[in-house]
């Protein structure tokens, strides 16, 4: 027998701001890395291996958020690339757009 639990969190204002900042930076780094990979491939025909750490000098606001969140964005992008090249039926990785925050962040 399987059991499921639902939890609802009530973050403080500071936590809400931090979550919004982290989500925004993750989306930014994913899109920036995707754009750079596409441009590099157009120029050289080879795949670019970039990391979030390379962008922290140019964009200092990335230092304010958790580095593991940015690393997960890199892993998700690499996973999408590998899946696209392995299975041609899979769509090319898309730019992430800002969506509404999940319901659990509304009060």
Image: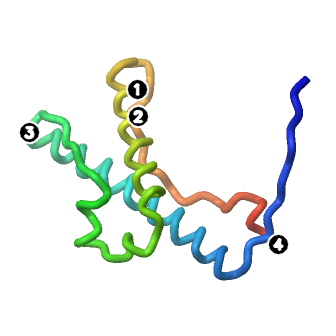
Mark 1 → mark 4, Cα distance in angstroms: 38 Å
Residue 93: give x, y in percent of width and height.
Answer: 40, 38
Q: Choose the circle earlier in sequence order: 3 or 4.
A: 3
Residue that badge 1 annotates: 83
Residue 9: give x, y in percent of width and height.
Answer: 79, 64
Specify the quadrant that holds the N terminus. Answer: top right
Residue 99: give x, y in percent of width and height.
Answer: 60, 58
Give SS at disc 1.
helix
Would you place residue 95 above or below residue 82 in this image? below
- Asked if the residue at tag 2 contacts the one at tag 4, i.e. Cβ–Cβ closer than 8 Å, the answer is no
Residue that badge 3 annotates: 44
The residue at 43%/75% (across/down) is 64
Would you place residue 44 above or below residue 98 in this image? above
Give SS at disc 2.
helix
Neighbour tally class for label 2: few under 14, some 14-19, many 20 plus, Cα within 10 Å = few
Mark 4 → mark 2, Cα distance in angstroms: 34 Å
Q: Nearer the viewer, residue 87 or 78?
A: 78
Mark 3 → mark 2, Cα distance in angstroms: 22 Å
The residue at 19%/47% (across/down) is 39
Mark 3 → mark 1, Cα distance in angstroms: 22 Å
Q: Choose the circle earlier in sequence order: 4 or 2.
A: 2
- Asked if the residue at tag 1 contacts the one at tag 2, i.e. Cβ–Cβ closer than 8 Å, the answer is yes
Neighbour tally class for label 4: few under 14, some 14-19, many 20 plus, Cα within 10 Å = few
Q: Choose the circle earlier in sequence order: 3 or 2.
A: 3
The residue at 86%/38% (across/down) is 4
Mark 2 → mark 1, Cα distance in angstroms: 6 Å
Specify the quadrant that holds the C terminus. Answer: bottom right
Residue that badge 4 annotates: 107
Residue that badge 2 annotates: 79
């Amino acid at each position: 027998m399987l059991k499921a639990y639902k939890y609802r969190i009530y973050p403080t204002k500071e936590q809400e701001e931090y979550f919004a900042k982290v989500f925004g930076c993750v989306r930014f780094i994913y899109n920036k890395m995707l754009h750079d990979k596409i441009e590099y491939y157009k120029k050289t025909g080879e795949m670019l291996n970039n990391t979030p750490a390379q962008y922290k000098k140019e964009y200092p606001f990335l230092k304010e958020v958790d580095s593991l969140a940015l690393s997960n964005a890199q892993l998700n992008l690499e996973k999408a690339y590998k899946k696209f090249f392995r299975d041609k039926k899979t769509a090319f990785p898309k730019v992430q757009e800002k969506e509404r925050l999940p319901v659990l962040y509304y009060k």
